[in-house]
Image (cartoon, rainbow, N blue to C red):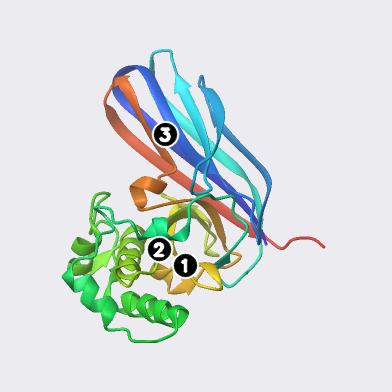
Amino acid sequence: MLNTVQHTTCYKYLHEANYSIQALKLWPADFDGQKVISWDIRIENADLTRLSHDGFGNLIYLATLSEPHREIRVEAQGEVEVEDRSGVVRGLKEAARPRVFLRQTTQSQADEAIESFAQSHKQADTLERLHMISESLANKVSFKVGATGAGTTAGEAFELGKGVCQDFSHIFIAAARSLNIPARYVTGYLFTGDDGSFDAHHAWAEAWVDNLGWVGFDVANGVCTTENYVRLACGLDARSAAPIRGSQQGGAIEDLDVHVYVQQQQVQS
């Protein structure tokens, strides 16, 4: 499938900023089952520099604005061809070994409740166990916009029993790591078949299965990743994998607006 993506992020400042710098993880990678046909990143009045792939396989760009400004508008768009590989991710240019993704973070730390939940799934086969954890989470936690925030931890969301894709991913990652299964947070885009318009990018998780590799689990939707998913970047948690992170001198963020538009069409043979 050919997925067409338009992703716009706009920061507006209450006071004029003198200088801004942004690290961008906004360029999808090529790997088995995903091929970037065209892609572009635009930031008005910014110097955009391509750095290199980090240890997780993410392509990093650096954007700097040296002149006074009250707004930063980041536009990423392009076409990505994706095949359904039943969630299996192979062929990424990544130096980090799977065990790196056993590292705990504040947002992805398993508490006693998550550990107990993970241990309650006794399947001997790792892949089957991960599927059962994903299915159980989808039944235990309800999708509710506004119930959690950007800083909500896996334990807090699990106790609340509500959250969004970020929370489902963090809980799944925490549960997997508590079982000594490497897991990581992934950002990207999802074609849902609706009008294609969203107010945020999507997020899911990947877990490592020996003799198979990384497998993508979209717990919020109860599926493994398919040709409807465009993979953007990964990290230890949402903060680590964030598409845009930066800072500025002066200014104060008055408004943040994000708009994502995804459309899909059959690849012409």
Given residues 65 and 196, the one toward you in this image is 65
Q: Position of residue 195 (x, y in %)?
A: 53, 58
- Residue designated by label 3: 10
Q: Classify the position of the C terminus by image quarter.
A: bottom right
- Residue designated by label 2: 183
Q: Residue at x 24, y 49 (%)?
A: 151
Q: Earlier in the sequence, mark 2 or mark 3?
A: 3
Q: CA distance from mark 2 to mark 1?
A: 6 Å
Q: CA distance from mark 2 to mark 3?
A: 31 Å
Q: CA distance from mark 3 to mark 1?
A: 35 Å
Task: Using the image, determine if residue 261 lies above or below residue 266.
Answer: above
Q: Residue at x 63, y 69 (%)?
A: 84
Q: Secondary structure at mark 3?
A: strand
Q: Residue at x 65, y 62 (%)?
A: 33
Q: Residue at x 30, y 70 (%)?
A: 175
Q: Residue 256 falls in which quadrant of the image?
A: top left
Residue 92 falls left or right of residue 207 = right
Q: What amino acid type is highlighted by mark number 3?
A: Cys
- Residue designated by label 1: 208
Characterize the local packing of mark 1: few (<14), some (14-19) or many (20 or more) Cα atoms within 10 angstroms. many
Q: What amino acid type is highlighted by mark number 2?
A: Ala
Is the C-beta separation of discs 2 and 1 under 8 Å? yes
Q: Earlier in the sequence, mark 3 or mark 1?
A: 3
Q: What amino acid type is highlighted by mark number 1?
A: Trp
Q: Residue 90 falls in which quadrant of the image?
A: bottom right
Is the C-beta separation of discs 2 and 3 under 8 Å? no
Residue 184 in sight in this render: no
Task: Using the image, determine if residue 18 lies above or below residue 138.
Answer: above
Q: Which mark is residue 131?
A: none
Q: Earlier in the sequence, mark 2 or mark 1?
A: 2
Residue 126 falls left or right of residue 171 = right
